[in-house]
Image: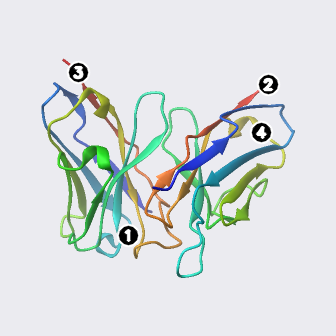
Amino acid sequence: EVQLVESGGGLVQPGGSLRLSCAASGFTFSTYWMTWVRQAPGKGLEWVANINRDGSEKYYVDSVKGRFTISRDNARKSLYLQMNSLRVEDTAVYYCARDSMTTVNTDLFDFWGQGTLVTVSS
Amino acid sequence: DVVMTQSPLSLPVTLGQPASISCRSNHSLVHSDGNTYLNWFQQRPGQSPRRLIYEVSNRDSGVPDRFSGSGSGTDFTLKISRVEAEDVGVYYCMQGTHWRTFGQGTKVEIK
């Protein structure tokens, strides 16, 4: 059974940093691109970043470029999101999702984690 | 940039009646490989999103056959043939052809 379990959320002041983790199981982690998606309170889904299978390619939504860094550890079957210079508008539930085996494919976003809440407030 | 526009944003439906959600893209979603990467997701209250439909019209495992997807190019539709109470939630379309973009979401509620 595919499982994605996020952790690392919490309350942080504006300008602060936080590192999210996503532990994967039930599939061969190293053969999939992985993604972070966020959802601000009462709002819709927003794709944040994704990373290819070996971590050599990373893509970001414009609003987080230069502040967030996506990474992965295939040996640990884990995905990460390092968030720096956090802003109030980054407050959201952050989900990790299985992206695709290639740049895009049938399995796109077929499994999601339960999410972890990040609150940026003074 | 690809923009996905859903309508309506709110959809009150009577139990047992059909429902239809539209999703339009400002660019064709036909990929260079010939496939169209348009997915539909359901998010029930308090839950994570769940994929219902992939590549326009293919239902995921365990998805009831009252859900169907259709469309091509830039215009797509999710239909629920007979709405049940468990279908309450927000539905999102998402394109994967030109990277990743979600629609704004359509909230389905029971009248």
Q: Which mark is residue A78?
A: none
Are circles 4 and 1 on residues that touch, CB within 8 Å? no
Same subunit under labels 3 and 4?
A: no
Say which residue label 2 marks.
B111
Are circles 2 and 3 on residues that touch, CB within 8 Å? no
Chain of the residue where label 4 is placed in the rendered structure: B
Q: Residue B17, how many percent across, how many down?
A: 87, 39
Q: Mark 3 packing: few (<14 Cα in 10 Å), some, or many (20+)?
A: some
Q: Depth check: give the residue in front, A122 or A30.
A: A122
Q: Depth check: give the residue in front, A38 or A75.
A: A38
B56 to the left or right of A29: right
B73 to the left or right of A86: right
Give the distance between the C-alpha atoms of the residues marked 4 and 2, in whole angstroms.
12 Å
Quarter where residue B64 is shown: bottom right
Say which residue label 4 marks.
B84
Q: Residue A27 carries which label?
A: 1
A35 to the left or right of B68: left
Label 3: which secondary element: loop
Are circles 3 and 4 on residues that touch, CB within 8 Å? no
Quadrant including the C terminus of chain B: top right
- Closer mark to the observer between disc 4 and disc 2: 2
Quarter where residue B9 is shown: top right
Q: Residue B104, how many percent across, how many down?
A: 55, 41
Residue drawn at (26%, 45%) of the image: A64
